[in-house]
Amino acid sequence: MLRTYKYRLYPTKDQRKQIEFTLERCRLLYNRLLEERIVAYKSHGKSLSYFEQANTFNERKKHIPAMKQVHSQVLQDVARRLEKAYQFFFRRVKQGETPGFPRFKPKQRYDSFTYPQGGYVLQGNKLKLSKIGVVKIKLHRSLEGSIKTCTIIMKNSCYYACFSCEMELEPLLPSQELIGVDLGLKHLAITSEGETFMASKHYRHSERKLIQLQRSVSRKKKDSHRRKKAVQVLAKQYEKVANQRKDHAHKVSRKLVNRYGLIAIEQLNVQSMIQNRHLAKSIADTGWSQFVQYIVYKAESAGRVVVQVDPRGTSQQCSECGNIVKKSLAERIHRCPCGYTGDRDINAARNILQRALQVS
């Protein structure tokens, strides 16, 4: 399987300029290649392929000397990135989804470039990058597996190196324990055994500070240096909230995967649910999709089984007798004529587990 390791970089002033220069050349090349594809389709009714565009790079370098200051494989990856954008576009068209045609990239939307095969070497606490130099790197954890690609990211004036590594699966000891998991707003997860994991609500806790920072940005004159600094401070605060949410989701998902051999979880359509203007902020703050994603990839690595089931009716159906007991969202206790009484969410988690066992 592939696993990505992310480390902080500490480039010098000259190296930062070179990284930003490389990003800008890649962005301009991406936009140019996209424009050529659009023009070719409008003029001749056919789209250019990755190989047709990549084979023109040597000729382009003769007319644009600045391209020679960027590693050749980094330039090739720009064309490959555009090719993937087109593939995703055509896949969405075939599946009847909202297509989303590839867009031209402004500076704010192009923040990374990739060394797909070579051009980078790890030397202790240094990372040697072709055309950039030897950059200090903070290896806060050991790197495992064989490195396939190295991606350099600039985010909120900070620099990171992401190594995509191919490694063997690391299965945990077999577990016969089964669990159903119901997702909620007050609790991130409620299990069929009655265990609860509180929702992080980091956005709610930071909302007042975010509002203050947003007002600070609004008061600054557009395109001024002070406004750029205020925007950067606001972006870092949003990034902190996102990192707190990720950390909480990682800890809870790891605890579930380490303990249970089969995890049954509801398959929610979060994009539709978030359209509810009364609950949208709380749903986004909880981060259900991210939490489920972490459970799935951790379970795959550990040799566990994750089954996602349709959640419709799990709160209304009795987990003991199967009868439907109608109740509003405000009613938090499930009471069935068969005599079973319990927490509404625990009852739903038990139903989710039963459905998963029927499927598997």
Image (cartoon, rainbow, N blue to C red):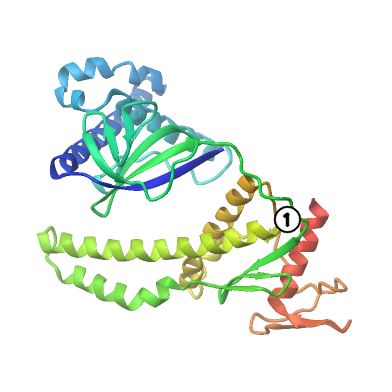
At horizontal 40% and vertical 23% (from top left) the residue drawn is: 50
User: Residue at label 1?
Assistant: 262
> Does residue 227 show up?
yes
**Is 57 in front, or is 169?**
169
At horizontal 50% and vertical 46% (from top left) the residue drawn is: 98
Q: Amino acid at mark 1?
A: Leu
Q: Is residue 139 above or below residue 353?
A: above
**Is 187 in front, or is 258?**
258
Picture coordinates of residue 105 (x, y %)? 29, 42
Q: Is residue 78 left or right of residue 272?
A: left
**Is 348 in front, or is 88?**
348
Picture coordinates of residue 88 (x, y %)? 49, 37
Q: Which secondary structure, mark 1?
A: strand
Q: Residue furthest front?
A: 124
Picture coordinates of residue 287 (x, y %)? 51, 63
At horizontal 27% and vertical 19% (from top left) the residue drawn is: 57
How crowded pointer 1 is (Cα within 10 Å; few <14, some 14-19, many 20+) is rated as: many
Q: Assign the N terminus to one quadrant of the image.
A: top right
Q: Total marks drawn? A: 1
Q: Is residue 193 left or right of residue 185?
A: right
Q: Is residue 69 above or below residue 95?
A: above
Q: Is residue 106 above or below residue 188?
A: above
**Is 88 in front, or is 81?**
81
At horizontal 81% and vertical 72% (from top left) the residue drawn is: 319
Picture coordinates of residue 174 (x, y %)? 74, 51
Q: Is residue 335 left or right of residue 80?
A: right
Rendered image quadrant of residue 325? bottom right
Rendered image quadrant of residue 183? bottom right
> Does residue 48 show up?
no
